Image: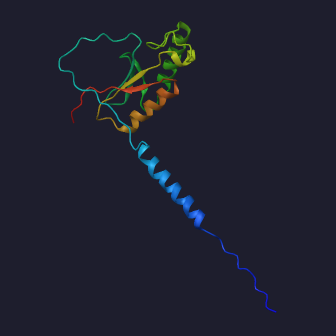
Amino acid sequence: MSTSRAVPAINVTPLIDVLLVLLIIFMVISPLKAARFKTLVPEEPSRRQNVVANIHTLVVSLDAYGRLRLNGGGLMGSARDTSQLAVALTELFRQRREARVFRHGLADVSAIPESERIEKTVFVKAPRSLPYGEVARVIDGIKGAGAQPIGLQIDELGP
């Protein structure tokens, strides 16, 4: 008597159907994924405007030698040592928290914690001749002091 055994085999037809459905889903979703982000560079004004600066604006300036100044005041260290600048900014932000100096339009927004509504915007101004690494070190020092957001000030848009 011969005993015939059934040979096990995997039916892959349902698996192929599932894979095709997944492929179609991923093909539909992939164009919706953001591949880049849009940045806006300010255009040169058509005429010169007299703009009054906000009294709470903070500008950290670097000169060609890497020396730091806060709002055009005295020296606050260098691009290689931002500790003096970080201490000054931390103290300034503490004073602003005590005086309740909020960002424009956020004074009455109770959904955002008070510590995040404090005006901590800092602009960095540096000459183009300064190496990028030194400017990045200054930005890191400013972030360490709690500043947010940090903007880069552009004086000239030409090459």
Residue 116, horizontal then vertical, whole percent: 53, 19
Quadrant of res 135: top left
State whether residue 124 is above or below residue 73. Answer: below
Position of 109 compared to 9: left or right?
left
- Camera-side residue of 134 and 122: 122
In the image, farthest residue toward the left: 47
- Quadrant occupied by the C terminus: top left
In the image, farthest residue toward the right: 1
In the image, farthest residue toward the top: 99
- Please tell me how many numbered marks the rendered image carries: 0
Residue 51, horizontal then vertical, whole percent: 28, 12
State whether residue 158 is above or below residue 88. Answer: below
Q: Residue at x 47, y 32 (%)?
A: 140
Position of 156 compared to 94: left or right?
left
Q: Residue at x 17, y 17 (%)?
A: 47
State whether residue 147 is above or below residue 17. Answer: above
- Camera-side residue of 2 and 64: 2
- Camera-side residue of 71 and 45: 45
Quadrant of res 5: bottom right
- Quadrant occupied by the N terminus: bottom right
In the image, farthest residue toward the front: 1
State whether residue 127 is above or below residue 114. Answer: below
Q: Residue at x 47, y 24 (%)?
A: 148
Q: How is the image coloured?
A: rainbow
Position of 101 compared to 15: left or right?
left
Residue 14, horizontal then vertical, whole percent: 60, 63
Q: Residue at x 37, y 11 (%)?
A: 54
